[in-house]
Each structure stands twice: as structure tokens, then as C-alpha cells.
Amino acid sequence: MEYFALLADGFLRIWRLDVLLVMLAAIPFGLIFGIVPGLSGLSALAILLPFTYGMEPLPGLALLLAAHAVVYTGGSVTAIVLGIPGSPPNAATVLDGYPMARNGLGGRAIGAALASSGLGGLFGVLVLVAVLPVLEPIVLLFGSPETFLLAVMGITFIAVVGEGTVEKGLIAGLLGIFLALFGYQPVTSVPRFYFDSDYLLDGFRIIPLALGLFAIPEIVGLSVKGRSVAQRGDAHVRFSQVVEGVVAVFRHPLLFLKSSAIGAVVGVVPGVGGETAPFVAYAAAKQSSRTPETFGSGEIEGVIAPESANNAKEGGALVPTLAFGIPGSAGMAILLGGFLILGLEPGPEFMREHMDLGVGLAMVLAFANVAAAAVMILFAPWIARITFLRGHVLAPLLLAVVVLGTFASKNNPMDVVYVFVFGALGYVMKILGYSRAPLILGFVLTGAMETYLHISIRTYGLFFFTRPISLIIIALLVLGLGWPFFKRLFARWRRT
């Protein structure tokens, strides 16, 4: 009964004027970053992160979470209309959505994608709400050794399944760990690598790093291109077709439920959910279809499956983020930075002391998904035209927001200098095919990894990893590292 009271309180809290206003501001911002190719959800979160300073916890986190929750909803539009995924997780939607658009059924595909995204997001919230009350006893089973190994597993998994090779992903994660070592050591308070610079005594800041890695390279790409980001396809869709697509989702209830469940479960695994969940759901839909040969040529089931998983995974990704302080995805890593800015530290203590805030965030996620889907369905014929906004108009506006947000976070001009330093690093990584997500995850998790490793060795000795749950996590870690090898071995066996 106490938990139901918390649910009711969380529902009422999102209707507070300050929370409602920040959500209504964040939703269109996130949708635009999803619709315009090249502007990822990570860039949207990085740009919004400085504006959380001085805010109360719920409005500040609602600003970030609402924008992040709807990015993939917007990204489905460009994936269908132009064949260009608005965000990497929308790539699975291109496989059948773009052929539908070329066959004159773009509006139907958009309607199915938007309805699947909104309802899938609600499904993820239901999973989160169902799991929250039983998380506390489960969390108590995880001591410092298990938390340390979970952090290592999160960085490793996102390096394995992210863009580029596994080696490049691991190098990026190690670089993030190295950058986090600058400044005072969290346990002993001994300064490291500060080169007699007062700025580096506190280490690198999350805001210049995140903005530099994710926002600057995309802005440079837009300014270099100059012309509008959309140069092909037809952005004009009919509203009647959009309604047909919405109805089609309700004609495939089992597919929707299965795909949403896959998204929520995959999202729980730290570092895996991002680009993986939509493709897993798409593969499962194709495997169980009566006509798998039609997939890839314009099958609406190939749109419903990945988009259902796309937003459902965010509810799942909040589970390890809140319970263990281990981001369930790269976006959750930046959200974790928002927690730290607001003076909160997710983990077992957070679940005991701030359960009401966790419930409030679940309600924010539900509201954002439903509101974004409704707005996109109503205005789909006009929203699609945003893709034709010229890059040389968009890039200066975004650059001004980045510089202003970076300086406003600490009123320190060195932050602005370092945002361009990290921007150069992010641009080089993008050109060379290095995934930037493992870097930001490694940077965010290093403090917790150092602290929990120190506590584990002091408490359990050098063989702290021999506890039962620790051995299970190590087994999963080895399986994750060996997954590409096992996949190649299986492919070779099938050929022979």
C-alpha cells in the first residue's frame, strides 16, 4: 500500500508547474535532435546538462530524461522518409520503413513507428514500476565487489556491441578511464596528473567532455555540409496513412508485446541496450513471422518490432542506473552525470532514501513517451519537413548554445577551451571509427570503480572476486568479450 501511495504521489508530482514546464520544453528539443540526422540523443543530453545546475532534483532530471526518452521517436521519421536513421538505434527501422516509403506507404510506416514507440515506452515504464519495489532486497545482495565488476562489465559490453571493432571500443573505454584519473584520487585525495594546473586539480568536467565528444563533431559535420541534411526522398505524408499505421500496431498485439519485452530485458543489461535491442527485436520478429522472406521489402512488422523495443529499453536501462549507479546505456551515463550535478548518487542508498524520486522519473518517462507520440502523430506531415533545414543555419545556433551552456555551468572560461579540445578528440574518433560511448562510460564509472575496488580489497582481500555473484558476473564478462569470436566461429561452422 505504501508503494501504491508512492506511485500516486509520483503521478501528481509530474503535474507540478515547474516539472510540467521543463518536460514541455524538453520534448520538442529531443524530437528535433531525433529527426535531424547526425544530431544524436547523446548530443541533446550533453547540451541540456549544464542547464540542470541550481534546479531541484525532479525538474532537473525530468529535463534530461524527457528529452532523451523521445529522441528515438523522432529518429524514426527520418529513418522511414529518407532511409537515414535519425539516431543509431533507428537503423533497424530503415530496413523495412524506407522500402514502405518508396512504395508510397511512408505515412503508414510513420504511424506504426510512432504508436509503437509511445506504447513501447509505456511498457518499459510498467517494467520499471513493477521491479522498483523488489529492487531493494536484490540490491542488498550486491556488495562492493559485485558493483565494481558490474561497472567493468558495462564498459566492456558497450565496447563489444558499439560501433567499430571490439578493440577500438575497448581502447575508447580505457581512454575514458585515463581521463577520469586527472585530479584528486577519490579515496586517498592525492592529486594526479594535474601538471601544476589549478583547473586540473578537480579533474576534467563531465559537461565539456560530453559536449566536446558528441555535439562539436556533429556541428562541424553540419557546417561542412552547408546544404540541408535531407537531399532525397519525399517528406510529404498523408495523415490518413498515419492513422492506418497506428491501427496496424493494435492488429499485431503479440508482436508488440514480445518486442517490448525484448527491449526492456536487453535494456537492463549495462551498456548493451542502445543499438542492440531494436536489432534483436527485429530478428525475433522475422524469425517468428509466417512470411520472413518479405522482411526488408516493406513489411510493417519490421517497423513495429524495432520501434517497440527502442523506447521500451529506456525503462529497462533505468533499472541498473537507479539501483547500482551503473548506466544501462550511453545516454544513461550522461543522465548519471545529471544525478551527480544535482548532488545525488544512484545506488543502494538512493533506492532506500529516494524511492519517491525513482517513481517520479518513471512517471516522467511515461508522460514523455505518450506526449511525444501524440504530437508526432498529429503533426507528422509537417514535422518531416524539418529534415530540409540547411546545415549552415542550424550549425551556428547549436554552437552558440554549446558555448553558452558550457560557460554557464561553472562560469569558467577554461571549460569552453576544453570543450573544443574534446571536440577535436571526438571528431578524430568519429573519422577513425572509434565509438565515443565507451569513452564517456569509462569516464563516468571510473570514480565508482576506484572506490569499490579499494573497499573490496580492504574488506575481502585480493580474492574478493570469488564470491558467488561475482563469479557469475565474471562469466558474463568473459562471454561478452568472447561474443564476436563465438559469432565468427558459428558463422564459419554454418558455412561448412
Image: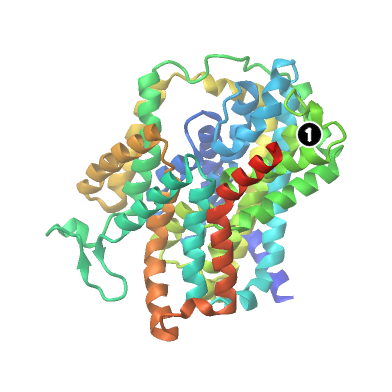
Query: Where 423 sits versus 353, above or below?
Result: above
Which amino acid, by three-letter code, is at mark 1?
A: Glu
Quick one: quadrant of the C terminus? top right
Q: Is residue 161 left or right of residue 181?
A: right
Crowd tier of the residue under label 1, counting other residues whose Cα lies within 10 Å: few below 14, some 14–19, many 20 or above: many
For the question of whether residue 147 can be seen, the reply is yes
The percent coordinates of residue 154 (x first, y second) are 51, 58
The residue carrying mark 1 is: 301
The percent coordinates of residue 345 (x first, y second) are 45, 68
Total numbered labels: 1
Quick one: quadrant of the N terminus? bottom right
For the question of whether residue 55 can be seen, the reply is no
Q: Is residue 161 left or right of residue 404?
A: right
Residue at 39 percent of width and 17 percent of height: 226
Query: Where 448 sits versus 43, above or below?
Result: below
Query: Where 428 sits versus 204, above or below?
Result: above
Q: Nearer the viewer, residue 47 or 43?
A: 43
Q: Nearer the viewer, residue 25 or 281?
A: 281
Q: Name the image quarter holding residue 433.
A: top left
Residue at 44 percent of width and 56 percent of height: 338
Residue at 78 percent of width and 48 percent of height: 258
For the rendered model, the colour scheme is rainbow
Residue at 40 percent of width and 73 percent of height: 453
Q: Nearer the viewer, residue 258 or 145?
A: 145
- What element does badge 1 sit on? helix
The percent coordinates of residue 495 (x first, y second) are 69, 36
The percent coordinates of residue 437 (x first, y second) are 45, 47
